[in-house]
Image (tube, rainbow, N blue to C red):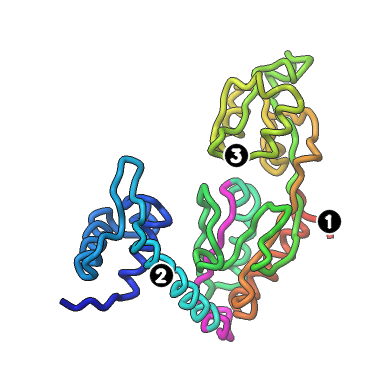
Amino acid sequence: MNRSLQWDDLRVVLAIVRAGSLSGAARGLGVSHATVFRRLQTVEERLGVRLFERGRSGYTATAAGEALAVTAEDMETRVLDVERQVAGRDLQPVGTVRLTTTDTLFDRVLSPLLAECRRAYPEIALEVVVPSQRVNLSRREADIAIRPSSNPPPTLVGRRVGVVRQAIYLHQQLASKAADWQALDWIGPDDSMGYRSLDGWMRKQGVDGRCRLRVDTTRGLYAAVRDGLGPAVLPCYLGDSNPDLRRLDDVPSLTSDLWLLTHADLRKTARIRVLMDFLGDALRAHPQVGLGE
């Protein structure tokens, strides 16, 4: 039997190690669960060794599986480095740019700017990714990121283009009846949202114990406030967009910078460069998140 491994074989093993399950690996690779299962069987038969232990909690790599995953990760890094270097040689603003941001920033801030960008650069095709978890620019999961952050990754380059301010919002109907917002039933982030700074603020203000509804997205927080379920902390670009909501109090401690980022190997690519310049200028001048420059 031919025991030589292909790059696709290593990618499957690495995806299973990272996800801990076949279904998670399938989502990451963009293939079916059955395809991942079949490829794993083929690799194990080819090598004559078990790469994973199957249990109720998922797939756990054996020593052989861990060793293969380390090799796969090293190869992935080399392949992505070459891809970025080749992509960085483009001279014309033509081709596809994959951009990642949050769903609310895309909806309330970025979508109109991207419409202007498409008119200015019609030969650039845009793909926008708004996942619940951050994508990795180093792995080429996206070319450009627009992220609220107090500490952007040192592996990326870019600039600070805005400020995301936060405030307490409440529906007008409730606001007219409530003299003390701290005494109301609150809306807060679910643990899976990972919004530790807001969790800490709510505990400090004494409203965490009054939280009667928790959701796992900023859009969910907004929807609950919009429908009169109580007060919550929202980004001002989102809360101020609805005239039915009243801004009760600003929360300066939750303010974060807005960054426009890309990988260093891509910054000289024409389509990346023009899009970074266009969005950077537009965001810095934006009335809701801009720096007023």
Q: In which quadrant of the rendered image does the N terminus lie? A: bottom left
Indicate left or right for 124 with 236 as reference: left
Classify mark 3: residues with Cα within 10 Å, few (<14), some (14-19) or many (20+).
Answer: many
* Residue depicted at 68% across the width and 52% down the height: 148
The residue to which callout 3 is attached is 218
Residue holding disc 2: 72
195 to 49, vertically: above or below: above
Query: Is disc 1 placed on a helix, strand or loop?
Result: loop
Q: Which of 9 and 44 is in front in this view?
A: 44
Neighbour tally class for label 1: few under 14, some 14-19, many 20 plus, Cα within 10 Å? few
Question: Which callout, 2 or 3, points at the residue further toward the start of the chain?
Answer: 2
Amino acid tagged 2: Ala
- Residues under labels 3 and 1: Cα distance? 25 Å
Badge 1 amino acid: Gly
* Labels 3 & 1 near each other (Cβ < 8 A): no
The disc labelled 3 sits on which kind of residue? Thr
Q: What element carries label 3?
A: helix
The mark lying in front, picked from 2 and 1, is: 2
